[in-house]
Amino acid sequence: MDKPAGMTSHDVVAAVRRIVRTRQVGHFGTLDPFATGVLPISVGKATRFAQFYLKSRKAYQGTIRFGFSTDTYDATGSPTSEPVHPSLHSEALERVFQQFTGRLAQVPPRFSAKHVGGVRAYELARQKKPVSLPPVNVEIYALELLGIEGDLVNFAVECSGGTYVRSLAHDIGQRLGCPSHLASLRRTAVAEFREDRSITLERLEELVRQNRLEDCLVPLEALLPECPELVVRGREEQSVRNGRRFQLAQATRPVRGMRSEGRSPVISLLKVLNADRRLIAVARHVSGTVYHPDLVLA
């Protein structure tokens, strides 16, 4: 889905439930209410695949406003600093952007869904209670300066799941010595789900009215496209369907350009298909050449 601004991810799920008339609807990756863009929605059996997308790579385009910070680290919050007139230069920004590329420890915003003593951090923040959140390890794969317009800086970022772009915008201002916050944000990709394939809620309603829901559904077999496939038949298929462990002849693949003793990392997940190439399970590596069907589709 192409989530509009002003809706929570749960709001979108509720709307899809109403439109497609089923309760079994979920999503792969929360998107803040003020943000727009790609929100993968799962329907039916696909809701069970959310576990495989929790740490998926994500891509965004956004705008940082320099001159003052906010308590939410975005444009929906209240100012927490006196306004200043920034003087922004691409060379300095690119140097700071480089410092925020790679693996880093990031402190989540006070206004976040993180739990503090069993309570959501944003609930404590709204009550003006102290919130202390430990840093989490995230990775920024790419951070690109797209342009400067007065006190606004446009950027694109690709990052690991769990990254708060709001914190990134706030921290960049701190490093640059000028308070800042995230003015706008649009998510352009979540794993294999891309902006050019996303549709609006209005378009979904139109397709359902025309009995063309299938036009916008992604087949289960297309999920986890980088995951190796294993085709099973007969007795092997039944064994997988019963959730029994199995052995794979080779759990690692030779590294290209190396001799046979060179091996790439162990294949952690396998998509298991039947003879008709229908997905019947996703198996996880246990040890050696042993795999266990973690997710079995009836």
Image (spheres, rainbow, N blue to C red):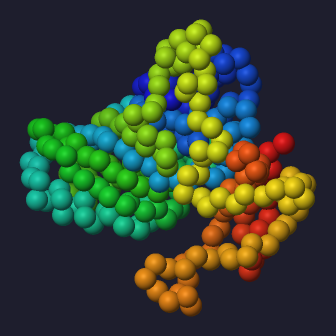
Q: How many marks?
A: 0
Q: Is residue 228 above or below residue 32?
A: below
User: Where residue 272 appears, x then y in whole percent?
Assistant: 73, 56
Position of 151 with respect to 224 (left or right) is left
Q: Residue at x 37, y 61 (%)?
A: 141
Residue 272 visible from this viewpoint = yes
* Closer to us: 41 or 283: 283
Q: Which residue is drawn at 55% across and 52% down?
A: 225
Q: Which residue is drawn at 47% across and 22% down?
A: 200
Which of the 4 image quadrants contains residue 222? Answer: top right
Q: Which residue is drawn at 87% across and 55% down?
A: 234
Which of the 4 image quadrants contains residue 73? Answer: top left
* Closer to us: 147 or 150: 147
User: Where residue 248 appears, x then y in whole percent?
Assistant: 74, 72
Which of the 4 image quadrants contains residue 244? Answer: bottom right
In the rendered view of the protein, which quadrant contains the C terminus?
Answer: top right
Q: In this view, does 24 lie above or below 156?
A: above
Position of 28 with respect to 147 (left or right) is right
User: Where residue 239 appears, x then y in whole percent?
Assistant: 89, 59
Residue 279 visible from this viewpoint = no
Residue occupying the far top of the picture: 209
User: Where residue 163 appears, x then y in whole percent?
Assistant: 46, 53
Position of 99 with respect to 4 (left or right) is left
Q: Is residue 139 above or below residue 116?
A: below
